[in-house]
């Protein structure tokens, strides 16, 4: 095991996180809307965190001096999860050093800070903060840092690492792990160019979303924060009511803002390689892709079902996630408004963004079941969305159909493929193993938190409601969705959970972001043996 190289790369990751902290400081200045009486703790907290992260980086750099640049598979398998754990720990420091309040009179604990940091970098979007619009509780600088973690985690810290530094065969192996094997074989220069392309598209889309939101009347601060959250499919917002806040602002065109966010959420859930072909004026590659077509078909089909069932069960109201009426008393909620709410919520949950415009957990049971399903499926491989990915569902369904055909046509031999790519049995075995492991992990963690969490939060509904709430939140953590149901739903947060549950959920977010295997590998003693 090349420990010197591992330490060297961990040092670079520490410096990367430290440098990012400085980007949040300008928002404490009065020219950017800051009030020093509120922003002083945030600025001091970020500076102390910057110094700490820099010191950690210097320490690892010292341990990794004169390191060889030859990285084998085992070291690459260790570097990716270790870098994520280190980045999450360092990103939690601003919350602690600034004394950010989880609620009025309650400062964030270590468990709170680690949960918030893990949620930000894994782009889960779950939060323990109960009041986002009070700078005396959460300074704007800290709020911006919170959204900046979405930016860093959306494309992946290690993708930026490879794009900026390259780092020879190190970058080649890291990119193969970080992108889930979606890159084609090639030299390390090919991988670096690929990483640069992804980063350019990602940053370009964020800039475009920011400009459009500003043109629609959203403040620059809120526009860039929501652009970070939208393209990373994260879900953090600068408002307590999430995107539903815009509907309460009478001077804003909330429906148009929601449509813009829907469009960019869909792009975030799309394979960025296909977006590259789109930029290169090759839209045919996008429409020929089986995974993307299935992704859009699921979005459209589930939206139609949710919309229809919502009309039947009268799910759609005029209040959304705020207490302010979205429409005048004389105005009847139009079918278009109901369809937009359905489309927004389905897109948000399938892309695992977690934005909300309504208390969707109060909708009918058919819609709730579909929300669980699309949140489990997630977006496309190579995008920023979480979930098990549409490609795995496509391959699994094709394999099932072929096995079913063998029952009555045992002598027929068919090639297993997705699009024009043939799949061997090892790929199918890996997908089945992954899905099985995901189901077992969700059930195990749900059982664990049921044992840990006291039933006092569920005074209404009893144990069945408690089970549904904790199961939905556990599924949400593994698939990096964000909100769950009930007491952990659209207008609620995770502050009510115990410290142990927050740490368990933090680990679940990391497992989901790294496709389950990598974090568990480094916890195995056999992995570190020669």
Image: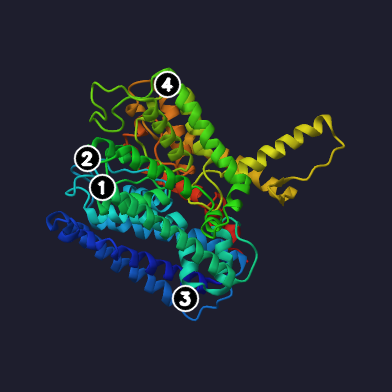
Q: Residues within 10 Å of mark 3 (few under 14, many from 20)?
A: many
Separation of marks 2 and 1 at Cα, in angstroms: 8 Å
Contact? badges 4 and 2 (CB < 8 Å): no
Contact? badges 2 and 1 (CB < 8 Å): yes
At mark 1, the secondary structure is loop
The dot on residue 64 is 3
Separation of marks 3 and 2 at Cα, in angstroms: 55 Å
Q: Which residue is mark 4?
A: 311
At mark 3, the secondary structure is loop
- Taking the spot 45% from the left edge, 33% from the top edge, the residue there is 472
- Taking the spot 39% from the left edge, 28% from the top edge, the residue there is 338
Check the image and report above or below for 213 versus 14. Answer: above
Q: Which residue is mark 2?
A: 251
* N-terminal label among 4 and 3: 3
In percent of width and height, residue 78 lies at 54, 62
Contact? badges 1 and 3 (CB < 8 Å): no
* N-terminal label among 1 and 3: 3
Q: Which residue is mark 1?
A: 217
Q: Nearer the viewer, mark 4 or mark 2?
A: 2
Separation of marks 4 and 2 at Cα, in angstroms: 28 Å
């Amino acid at each position: 095991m090349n420990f010197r190289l591992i330490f060297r790369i961990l040092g670079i990751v520490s410096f990367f996180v430290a440098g990012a902290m400085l980007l949040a400081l300008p928002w404490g200045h009065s020219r950017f809307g800051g009030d020093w009486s509120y922003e002083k703790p945030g600025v001091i907290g970020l500076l102390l965190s910057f110094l700490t992260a820099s010191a950690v980086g210097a320490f690892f750099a010292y341990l990794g001096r004169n390191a060889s640049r030859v990285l084998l598979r085992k070291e690459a398998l260790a570097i990716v999860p270790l870098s994520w754990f280190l980045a999450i720990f360092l990103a939690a420091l601003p919350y602690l050093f600034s004394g950010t309040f989880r609620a009025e009179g309650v400062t964030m604990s270590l468990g709170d800070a680690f949960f918030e940091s893990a949620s930000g970098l894994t782009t889960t979007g779950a939060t323990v903060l109960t009041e986002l619009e009070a700078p005396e509780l959460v300074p704007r600088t800290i709020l911006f840092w919170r959204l900046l973690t979405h930016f860093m985690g959306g494309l992946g810290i290690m993708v930026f690492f490879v794009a900026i530094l390259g780092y020879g065969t190190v970058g080649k192996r890291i990119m193969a792990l970080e992108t889930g094997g979606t890159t084609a074989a090639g030299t390390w220069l090919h991988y670096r160019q690929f990483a640069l392309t992804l980063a350019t598209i990602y940053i370009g889309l964020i800039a475009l979303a920011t400009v459009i939101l500003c043109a629609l009347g959203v403040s620059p601060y809120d526009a860039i924060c929501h652009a970070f959250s939208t393209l990373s499919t994260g879900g953090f917002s600068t408002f307590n009511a999430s995107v539903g806040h815009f509907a309460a602002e009478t001077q804003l065109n909330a429906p148009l803002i929601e449509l813009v966010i829907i469009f960019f959420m869909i792009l975030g859930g799309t394979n960025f390689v296909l977006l590259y072909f789109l930029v290169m004026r090759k839209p045919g590659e996008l429409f020929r892709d089986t995974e993307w077509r299935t992704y859009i078909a699921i979005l459209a089909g589930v939206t139609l079902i949710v919309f229809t069932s919502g009309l039947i069960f009268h799910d759609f109201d005029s209040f959304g996630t705020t207490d302010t009426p979205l429409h005048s008393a004389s105005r009847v909620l139009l079918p278009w408004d109901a369809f937009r709410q359905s489309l927004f919520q389905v897109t948000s949950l399938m892309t695992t963004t977690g934005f909300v415009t309504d208390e969707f957990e109060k909708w009918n049971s058919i819609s709730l079941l579909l929300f669980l399903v699309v949140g489990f499926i997630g977006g496309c491989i190579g995008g920023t969305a979480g979930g098990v990915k549409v490609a795995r569902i496509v391959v699994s369904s094709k394999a099932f159909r072929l096995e079913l055909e063998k029952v009555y046509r045992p002598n027929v031999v068919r090639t297993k493929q997705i699009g024009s790519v043939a799949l061997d049995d090892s790929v199918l075995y890996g997908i089945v193993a992954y899905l099985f492991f995901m189901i077992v992990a969700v059930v195990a963690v749900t059982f664990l938190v049921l044992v840990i969490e006291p039933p006092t939060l569920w005074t209404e509904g009893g144990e069945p409601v408690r089970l549904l709430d904790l199961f939905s939140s556990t599924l949400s953590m593994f698939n990096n969705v964000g909100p769950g149901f009930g007491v952990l739903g659209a207008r609620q947060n995770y502050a009510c959970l115990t410290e142990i549950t927050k740490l368990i959920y933090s680990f679940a977010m990391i497992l989901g972001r790294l496709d389950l295997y990598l974090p568990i590998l480094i916890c195995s003693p056999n992995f570190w043996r020669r």
